[in-house]
Each structure stands twice: as C-alpha cells, then as structure tokens.
C-alpha cells in the first residue's frame, strides 16, 4: 500500500502560522517520498497566483514560495473550485501545474487506500 497525504489549507495571510505549517508539512511529506496533494482553499487560494507566495513572510519559517515549489515538483496542488470562483480566478490565472477541482475530487483523494488527510 502506498502512502499518500492530502493537506487542506484554509488560511492565508489572515493566519500566517497555520498557513505556513500546512505548506511545511506538505513539503516535508514530499521530501519523505509521500504522495502529496495540497489543497488551497479560502484565503490560501491566492498563493496559486504567480508572485503571491513570494509576498508571504513569516519570521523563522521557510519561504512559502520554496515550499510550494517542492510540492509542485513532486506532488499535486489544487485550488478549490468555489474558492477560485469567489476570487474570480481561472486556470489561466494560476501557476503552471496548479489545477482547479471541487469537492468530489477532494473526497476521492481522501478516501484512497492508505490516504491520510490533514486540515489547517
């Protein structure tokens, strides 16, 4: 059975420590060889827009854009369909490799054999 982790982050600049923790856990899991799916919901959806992760700063934390790059290189990054729509974001607005998908896809990923899910 393969190991997989679904990380759903609901916070952005409004809760920087919680936001950074989700990205850190996702990147650490990728580095450990885990199949990772990072879901950006709520205010974290903005970090799928080019240049936005570079503006995020949290003392004593790895740069968010570096963590996002790690996940994009070996995992999946998804913006919630409704969250994208509420922010007038389309696939053309997002970093290459980031997709938009909805609740059915989230449920499918979290119910896979051996999957673990974390929500921040």
Image (tube, rainbow, N blue to C red):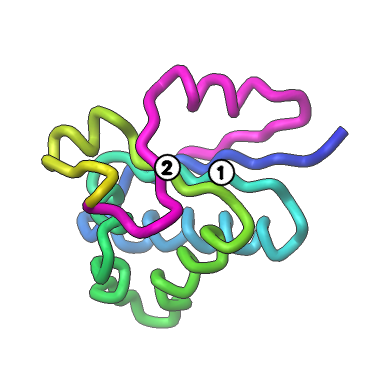
- Residue of label 1: 37
Residue 88 position in % (x across, y down)? 12, 40
Q: Compared to 43, does 15 lie above or below?
A: below
Q: Is residue 116 magenta?
A: yes
Residue 120 visible in the current orientation: no
Is residue 97 shown left or right of residue 36?
Answer: left
Residue 5 position in % (x across, y down)? 64, 41
Do labels 1 and 2 touch, CB within 8 Å? yes
Write the residue at 64% across / 63% down. Answer: 28
| Residue extent of the magenta highlight | 93-120
Which residue is nearer to you in this view: 11 or 83?
83
Which residue is nearer to you in this view: 92 or 51?
92
Secondary element at image label 2: strand
* Precedes in sequence: disc 1 or disc 2: 1
Write the residue at 30% across / 75% down. Answer: 54
Cα–Cα gap, marks 1 and 2: 7 Å
Is residue 25 shown left or right of residue 99?
Answer: right
Secondary element at image label 1: strand
- Residue of label 2: 78
Residue 34 position in % (x across, y down)? 73, 51
In the picture, residue 8 is in which quadrant?
Answer: top left
Residue 19 position in % (x across, y down)? 37, 56
């Amino acid at each position: 059975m393969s190991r997989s982790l679904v990380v759903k982050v609901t916070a952005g600049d409004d809760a920087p420590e919680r936001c950074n923790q989700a990205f850190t856990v996702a990147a650490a899991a990728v580095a450990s060889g885990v199949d990772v799916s990072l879901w950006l919901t709520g205010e974290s959806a903005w970090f799928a827009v080019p240049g936005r992760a570079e503006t995020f700063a949290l003392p004593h934390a790895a740069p968010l854009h570096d963590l996002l790059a790690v996940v994009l290189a070996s995992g999946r990054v998804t913006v919630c369909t409704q969250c994208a729509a509420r922010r007038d974001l389309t696939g053309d607005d997002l970093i290459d490799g980031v997709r938009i998908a909805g609740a059915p896809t989230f449920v499918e990923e979290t119910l896979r054999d051996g999957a673990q899910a974390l929500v921040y």
